Image (tube, rainbow, N blue to C red):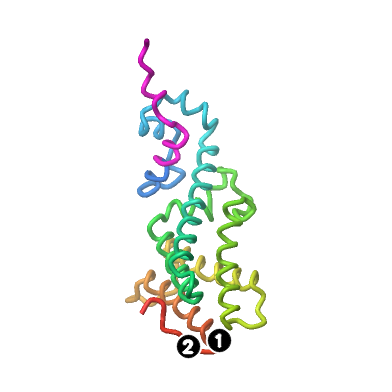
Amino acid sequence: MARPRKEQQIEIEKAAITATIDLLTTSAAEDISLARIAKEIGCSAPALYTHFASKNALLKAVHDAGFVMMLDQKLATAARHRSDPIARLWEGGLAYLQFAFENPNLYRLMFDPPKEAGLSGSPFESDVGARCLGVLVQAVRACQVAGYLPEAEAGKTAFLLWSTVHGAAMLTLLDRAPVLADEDSRDAAISAVDSLMRFLISTGPQTPPAANA
């Protein structure tokens, strides 16, 4: 019986997505090619093309995988702080920044993809993107049950929170953050989350201990 070729022993689709995410730690999405990915995972280019007809198809899969990674992080944070809605929201904001800072090129692909990648739609139109947003909306509602943000609409508040933290993350990654010459932009982004949460706490009945104290 003939031995299977190496590429027949590889889960090509999964391996290609993983390899692309790994390469994004050192390379921009624009600099990654299908030929390079095929070489990285040890399969032939034609074999890879049977799973991804184009580089854009691969980038779309990696884009979606990024949101799965983000969702897993959000769910883990929510589980750790299930009984403390303030800590859930606060630590969730800090974890979001950590995700962006540790995966800058993947984060850019998720929220500011190359035009030629064909990813012009809202990421929140996908199931996993909508679930990421849903975790944040649920965290806001948990805070409201605890007496914070009275009368606020949870969806609009979630938009405000996500937009603020995303803006801090993206400005930092682009090296465009409005910080002083001697101030670290990542520290400033973290301070933005802290300030936002302190404002949220001020709307409630009492002041709990800081989540990151």
Name the residue beneath numbered marker 2.
Answer: 207
Left or right: residue 163 versus residue 7 is right
Magenta region: which residues?
A: 1-19
Left or right: residue 79 versus residue 132 is left
Q: Position of residue 129 (x, y in %)?
A: 58, 54
Disc 2 marks which amino acid? Answer: Thr
**Residue at point 60%, 81% (across, down):** 149
- On residue 48, the disc is none
Foreground residue among 110 and 198: 198
Disc 1 marks which amino acid? Answer: Gly
Name the residue beneath numbered marker 1.
Answer: 204
Question: Marks 1 and 2, Cα distance to the nearest angstrom?
Answer: 7 Å
Count how many numbered circles sit on residues in the image. 2
Q: Looking at the rendering, which quadrant does residue 142 occupy?
A: bottom right
In magenta segment, residue 7? yes
State the predominant SS element of the stretch in magenta. helix
**Residue at point 52%, 32% (across, down):** 52
Badge 1, how many Cα within 10 Å: few under 14, some, many 20+? Answer: some
- Rendered-image quadrant of the N terminus: top left
